[in-house]
Image (cartoon, rainbow, N blue to C red):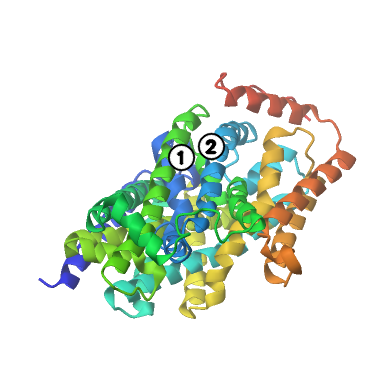
Amino acid sequence: MTDQTYKLIAMAIYMLAMLAIGWWAYRRTTDLDDYMLAGRDLKPGVAALSAGASDMSGWLLMGLPGAIYVSGLVEGWIAVGLTAGAWLNWKFVAPRLRSYTLVSNNSITVPSFLENRLKDRSRILRVVSGVIILVFFTFYVSSGMVAGGVFFESSFGSSYLVGMLIVAGVTIAYTLFGGFLAASYTDVVQGLMMLAALILVPLVGLGQVGGFGGMTDSLREINPDMLDPIAGGTAVGIISALAWGLGYFGQPHIIVRFMALRSPKDAVAGRRIGVGWMLLTVIGALMTALIGAAYFQQNNLTLSDPEAVFLELSLIFFHPLVAGFVLAAVLAAIMSTISSQLIVTSSALVEDLYKIVLKRDASPGSMVLLGRMGVLVVSVISILIAVSRNASILELVGFAWAGFGAAFGPTILLALFWRKLTTAGALTGMIAGAVTAFLWGTLEMPGILGDVYEIIPGFLINLLLTVIVSRVTFKPSAEIDAEFDDAVRISKGDGEPAATVPA
């Protein structure tokens, strides 16, 4: 058999496994709570690996190694910021969000939680939140499909359109039928594949370049500052890279995993597994880049696309069948993010817009059907956008992380830890944060301000305006206070929800 055949066999096995998990999840999904949150019965290991896999996407196996391959360890500060942000998210947000969403009318989406937490009778907060999620994630999903098309084009020589449609079709199929449960369990498989690949490639690579000594000698020949995490960087640049960690608090497709945990106590095990996975994979990605640079230098080879360093090393080091599974890990990173985002956009469309704007409800079975239709609608729109292969879609990914972090990050934190948050404050801050991040990221900012990542001003302005407006508009509520106290108590593992005090 040819090398290409071996790789295609590995890819087919991976795709069939994802579809099988989707079918298994389909048979366990009966109502909207199952479809959107897996019945709040997610084990900590599943939640942790699912959050990590849906978070990292192709950036971990292609974007980060490519940046370090070109510029050295100075590009690693983003990984430091993300790891710290993930730890803080699991430590503080996960247990409180799990308990508070249950206390506040069993909220199953981020917008419904904000509405229930603040007792927003106007429902405008939920609609605005749903629209923000729907718009940004439609383009975010599309960017993942573009990445899938590019992957098949570069790895198998297929056309971009065929590759994109294969990735979109398989991901849509298991997400459409299996919902959140399928997305979560496929994420587990995909997360383990990513971990195995990012351990295997550096381990084999070290032997190829003469160990750590041979690697460092080669890297110093390429660039004496390559192993210096400060050289070539600026204070503003490093702070902006670290600020990526702020985005975690506002990413709907990540924090929804916390809402699906079996209990708040599971957040402890989830944090250890999730952050441990993240540390190992980030170190693996970093080592892959450095080993790749050393290997190509030692063998007088040229790498045309730095972001393909992981792919090229896997093809060089392994038998084509093994390389095929390593390549499947890259595809897994892309597909895990698409599936998670499809579920969140579907929930926003059905739970936060359809039911609210049209003022209609339906039977559990009908709501699941509507959820699946939501996945299909968002997928079709995303595919139509991805067909054009517009570079601006890919550029939107960086903005989307900042936009979600700036729009939802401070709002979620204050909703969980400050009882005086009001609807007016949350709405003002959310809109201001999103607008600030958008304008900062798209307009030419003068001088040093142009080097500041847009999540920093967006997050700070959201936080400031939310606190000011909330203090002006705050009115005591016995119902809100009772739920707040209930959420705090349950997050510490103290019993079940108590009856709330009527408004």
Q: Is residue 119 above or below residue 246?
A: above
Front tag of 2 and 1: 1
* 2 and 1 marks in contact (CB < 8 Å): yes
> Would you name the residue on which mark 2 appears?
90
Residue 438: mark = none
Place residue 439 in its image quadrant.
Answer: bottom right
Measured in 3D between alpha carbons, the distance from the residue under mark 2 to the one under mark 1, in whole angstroms, is 9 Å
Q: Which residue is at the far left?
A: 1
Q: Position of residue 151 (x, y in %)?
A: 36, 70
Query: For the N terminus, which image quadrant?
Result: bottom left
Q: Hey, which residue is sitting farthest right in the picture?
A: 472
Q: Nearer the viewer, residue 73 or 91?
A: 73
Residue sitting at x 18%, y 62%: 321
* Residue 466 appears in the figure: yes
The image position of residue 424, as x and y in percent, is 82, 47
Residue sitting nearer the eye, 283 or 330: 283
SS type, badge 2 = helix
Give the residue pinned by disc 1. 275
Q: Residue at x 72, y 25 (%)?
A: 482
**In terms of secondary structure, where does tag 1 sit?**
helix
Residue 467 picture quarter? top right
Residue type, numbered disc 1: Val
Front one among 369 and 174: 174
Tell me: 236 left or right of 476.
left
Q: Amino acid at mark 2?
A: Trp
Residue 331 visible to the viewer: no
Q: Earlier in the sequence, mark 2 or mark 1?
A: 2
Q: Residues within 10 Å of mark 1 (few under 14, many from 20)?
A: many
